Amino acid sequence: MNADVFAEKWEQIRDEVQEQWSRLTDADLKEIQGQMSRLVRLLQERYDYSRERVEREVGSFLARFDNGFKPTGTLSKATDMISETVAGTSAKAREAAATVRETMEEASTQVRETTDTLRNTAQDVPAQARETVSAYPWQAIVAALFLGFIVGLLFQPGRRKDS
């Protein structure tokens, strides 16, 4: 990573820098202000390392960032955990939606089949009634008279209503 990219991404990696080199103070981080040369100088002072060693460590540290700037430290782990949770939740939501959709389609099919069965049965009732009356005419007459008598009793004009 060159110094220009480091400067542009300083705010994104600042916490990772402090986590990596805990001897750097908040004042040091403010002083660095995204300048790699200041980081190198302050690391030399705080850790008493040679310039070459600091440059190697800084290079290794910055190499941990893939895709330009995806940290691989604690921040990255938290980001990955959140991403995995969101992805898992999204997958479960899609599965639940598919299950609901399948259940609704099955229910719709059952309602349609039941409606068709009832319609067919209702259409068959008059034909079945004709067949029954034709096969048992005297029983049909007696049943009709009995039914008429019961209906007449229920709806006779002088009948009192109990409150």
Image (tube, grey):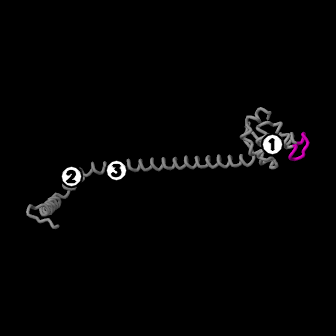
Pick out the residue farthest to the top.
Answer: 4
Seen in the image, is 98 located left or right of residue 108? right
**Secondary structure character of the magenta stretch overall:** helix
Residue 117 badge: 3
Q: Nearer the viewer, residue 33 or 134?
A: 33
User: From which residue to which does the magenta span run?
Assistant: 44-53
In magenta stretch: residue 46: yes
Q: Which residue is mark 1?
A: 61
Give the mark, 1 or 3, whose residue is nearer the N terminus.
1
Looking at the picture, how far across and down is residue 75, in whole percent?
71, 47
Binning the other alpha carbons within 10 Å of mark 1 as few (below 14), some (14 to 19) or many (20 upward) gives some
As drawn, the residue found furthest toward the bottom would be: 162
Q: Nearer the viewer, mark 1 or mark 2?
A: 1
Looking at the picture, which amino acid does disc 1 mark?
Phe
Query: Measuring 86% from the left and 46% from the top, which residue is drawn there?
Result: 46
In the rendered image, residue 18, in percent from the top left (x then y), is placed at: 77, 46
Coordinates of residue 145 in the picture (x, y in percent): 13, 61
Residue displayed at 80% across by 49% down: 22
> Which residue carries the number 2 mark?
130
**Quadrant in which the N terminus is drawn:** top right
Check disc 3: other Cα within 10 Å, few if <14, some if 14-19, many if 20+: few
